[in-house]
Image: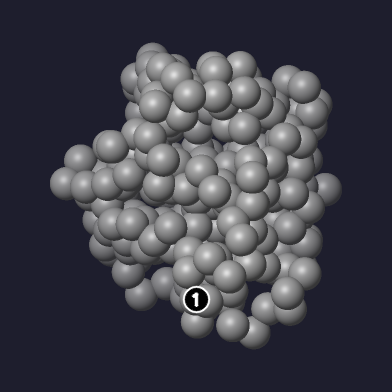
Amino acid sequence: MTATLLLLRHGESTWNLENRFTGWTDVPLTATGEAEAHKAGQLMLQEGLVFDVVHTSLLLRAIATTEIALREMGLHWLPVKRHWRLNERHYGALQGLNKKETAERYGADQVFAWRRGYATPPEPLDWDDDRHPRHDPRYAELTPDLVPGSECLKDVVERMLPYWHDQVVPDLRAGKRVLIGAHGNSLRALVKHLDGIGDDEITDLNIPTGIPLLYELDGDLRKVSSRYLGDAEAAKAAAEAVARQAG
């Protein structure tokens, strides 16, 4: 018996378009991002996919992408679980900055380490900064040690995996077909776990916006197969475009 898991990174957001570090900043989709979400739903429908439960982050771009895709599939009524542990990586003081301009200021190697390195967090937001998530009502019930001012991918893995084990795994073991709508780095963290990717090799993984990534898992929830839906070359080109964003 295999389990079905679909990972969907949100469509292009306004700050993706402007090549800005977004993190936990709650920005909407662009018209292109909405079109990507519609296309994602169409691809899943063409594949004959059906889901029983949906998990998303607390950020608008992931929520909107998932809702649009589900409407395309006629599955807008599905139960949805939302949690901050599926949020994008918190980029600290980099949030809002243009990636190319940041590379020109700090050097391409430093920005690459911040963007794709495993254990190199950017400078954190000050605790009293108005942009700090502790001021956001979505995170008001979190203890101070859980509210990040900055994160590296290692931090995202450590805060995402408890949600995977406590919430998603029980759904899969119950035979439910699961869709997760999230972000580039929270999904990189999950793919790292599912594919057994090493800390050094994870730097090469880029997840494109709006293209569904389908996993089939065995009875022990180990990967049997994974693939992007639709044109494989288009998915590869979109992933390469993500890798070039600091340029």
Please name whichever residue, 32 or 143, is drawn nearer the observer in this view of the structure.
143
Q: Secondary structure at mark 1?
A: loop
Q: In the rendering, at what x and y percent does residue 118 appear?
A: 73, 33
Q: Is residue 239 above or below residue 14?
A: above
Q: In the rendering, at what x and y percent does residue 220 appear?
A: 83, 48
Q: Quadrant of the C terminus?
A: top left
Q: In the rendering, at what x and y percent does residue 45 appear?
A: 32, 47
Outermost residue toward the left in this view: 31
Residue 80 as seen in the image, left or right of residue 66: right
Q: On the image, numbered disc 1 is attached to which residue?
A: 136
Query: Is residue 227 visible to the viewer in this orientation of the structure?
Result: no
Please name whichever residue, 178 or 119, is drawn nearer the observer in this view of the structure.
119
Going by the numbered disc 1, the residue's amino acid type is Asp
Quarter residue 107 falls in: top right
Picture residue at 46% right of the left edge, 29% below the top: 102
Picture residue at 73% right of the left edge, 20% below the top: 201
Query: Is residue 101 visible to the viewer in this orientation of the structure?
Result: yes
Please name whichever residue, 128 or 116, is drawn nearer the observer in this view of the structure.
128
Residue 56 as seen in the image, left or right of residue 172: left
